[in-house]
Image (cartoon, rainbow, N blue to C red):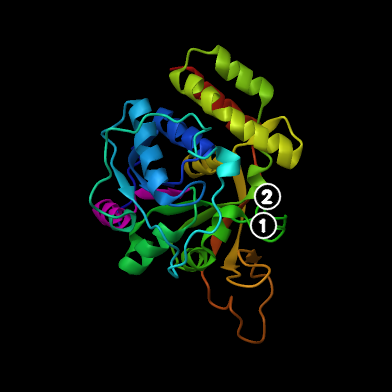
């Protein structure tokens, strides 16, 4: 397998369902000098897939980066289920704070999200990081499409899971895993280098109202844009969590993939509950006990799961990068 050249930019595909915090993560990735965003792929989650594609194209136009391809992903789960829950009450009906931006001029490429991931991982073996910010359907489809994908991809950094804390869809499940639990289980057990950043970590990273005021007072074009779309997101957090700030889920996952020193991890096998009252629950087996009988965790590969985060460094990085343009 080819190894990434020291000092070379990290090639990233962002699998996304924009989404206010997805917009923040995408802009942040475009502002990181050590990152080369080689494509966006789209998935249902905060919005349906069609709208996710429209929003991804729109955000790249705002950023002046229409050179970056967008590949549309699956409209249904890996078991052909339809998306039951769209988080429009969190991000706005349009996914971007109910601003009703004009439609983008660009179009998605002909390849599907899974085909694009497989192609790029083959083209740059060991060098591509997939940062998955929504349900894991596209990544699971890439794994099924090409048995070599798990070995070719450098890393899959995913925002997902609620490890030893309550979920945010219900007490058991976090939204991205709940969106397609069967796909998540395929990804966690595929043998790739996987980093899971769950809400046990992202709930420690908060952009406060004071931070938003600071963004608003800057001349940064990304900061100005984000302040326009943030109100719906702030309003949801006030209602749901009684807090005057917003969780930085997607930017935290992105930055953890780019700079692992921002987090600490534990390792073990992760399985996902795919039915019943705890559908979407992520369980980490730390491999400290060897069970006498065979279990659903036996011989499953280990993955990395984030357990602590340098939240002040992440907020500072986000603010610095988005205010200076």
Please name the residue shown 52% across and 53% down the image.
195
Which range of residues does the magenta coloring cover?
116-132
Question: Which residue appears at 67% of the width and 81% of the height?
Answer: 291
Q: Which of 9 and 19 is in front in this view?
A: 19
Q: Tell me if mark 1 has few (under 14), some (14-19) or many (20+) residues whose alpha carbon lies within 10 angstroms of its own.
A: many
On the picture, is 284 further left or further right than 56?
right
Image quadrant where residue 140 sits: bottom left
Residue positioned most to the bottom: 293
Pointers 1 and 2 in contact (C-beta within 8 Å):
yes
Q: Distance between the residues labelled 1 and 2?
A: 6 Å
What residue is pinned by disc 2? Answer: 200
Q: Reply above or below: 181 against 176.
A: below
Question: What residue did someone put label 1 on?
Answer: 163
Q: Quadrant of the C terminus?
A: top left
Percent across and percent down for residue 241 are 74, 40
Task: Tell which residue pokes out farthest to the right in this image.
Answer: 242
Task: Find out whether residue 57 is within the magenta segment.
Answer: no
Picture quadrant where residue 270 is located: bottom right
Whether residue 9 is visible here, answered yes or no, is no
Q: Which of 185 and 276 is in front in this view?
A: 276
Say whether residue 220 is visible: yes
Q: Is residue 55 above or below residue 63?
A: below
Q: Horizontally, is 243 left or right of 77 in the view?
A: right
User: In this picture, is 256 found above or below 214?
Assistant: below
- Is residue 128 found inside the magenta-colored segment of the image? yes
Q: Is 85 placed left or right of 204 in the picture?
A: left
Q: Where is residue 178 in the image (x, y as percent from the top left)?
A: 58, 60
Q: Between residue 222 and residue 302, name the one nearer to us.
A: 222
């Amino acid at each position: 397998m080819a190894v990434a050249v020291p000092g070379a930019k990290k090639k990233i595909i962002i699998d996304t369902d924009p989404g206010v915090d997805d917009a923040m993560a995408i802009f942040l990735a475009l502002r990181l000098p050590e990152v080369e965003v080689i494509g966006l792929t789209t998935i249902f989650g905060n919005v349906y897939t069609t709208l996710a594609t429209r929003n991804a194209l729109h955000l790249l136009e705002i950023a002046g980066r229409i050179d970056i391809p967008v590949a549309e992903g699956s409209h249904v789960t890996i078991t052909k289920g339809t998306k039951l829950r769209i988080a429009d009450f969190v991000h706005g009906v349009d996914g971007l704070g109910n601003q009703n931006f004009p439609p983008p001029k660009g179009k998605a490429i002909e390849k599907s999200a899974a085909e694009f991931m497989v192609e790029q991982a083959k083209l740059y073996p060991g060098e591509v990081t997939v940062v998955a910010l929504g349900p894991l359907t596209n990544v699971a489809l890439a794994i099924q499409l090409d048995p070599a994908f798990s070995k070719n991809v450098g890393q899959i950094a995913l925002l997902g899971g609620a490890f030893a804390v309550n979920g945010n869809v219900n007490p058991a499940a976090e939204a991205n895993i709940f969106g397609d639990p069967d796909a998540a289980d395929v990804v966690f057990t595929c043998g790739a280098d996987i980093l899971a950043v769950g809400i046990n970590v992202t709930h420690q990273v908060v952009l406060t109202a004071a931070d938003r005021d600071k963004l608003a007072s800057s001349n940064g074009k990304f900061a100005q844009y984000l302040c326009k779309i943030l109100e719906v997101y702030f309003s949801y957090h006030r209602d749901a969590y009684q807090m005057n700030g917003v969780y930085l889920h997607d930017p935290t996952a992105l930055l953890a993939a780019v700079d692992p020193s921002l987090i600490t991890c534990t390792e073990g096998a992760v399985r996902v509950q795919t039915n019943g009252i705890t559908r979407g629950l992520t369980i980490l087996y730390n491999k400290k006990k060897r069970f006498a009988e065979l279990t659903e965790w036996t011989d499953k590969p280990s993955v990395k799961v984030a357990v602590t985060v340098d939240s002040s460094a992440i907020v500072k990085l986000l603010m610095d990068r988005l205010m200076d343009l």
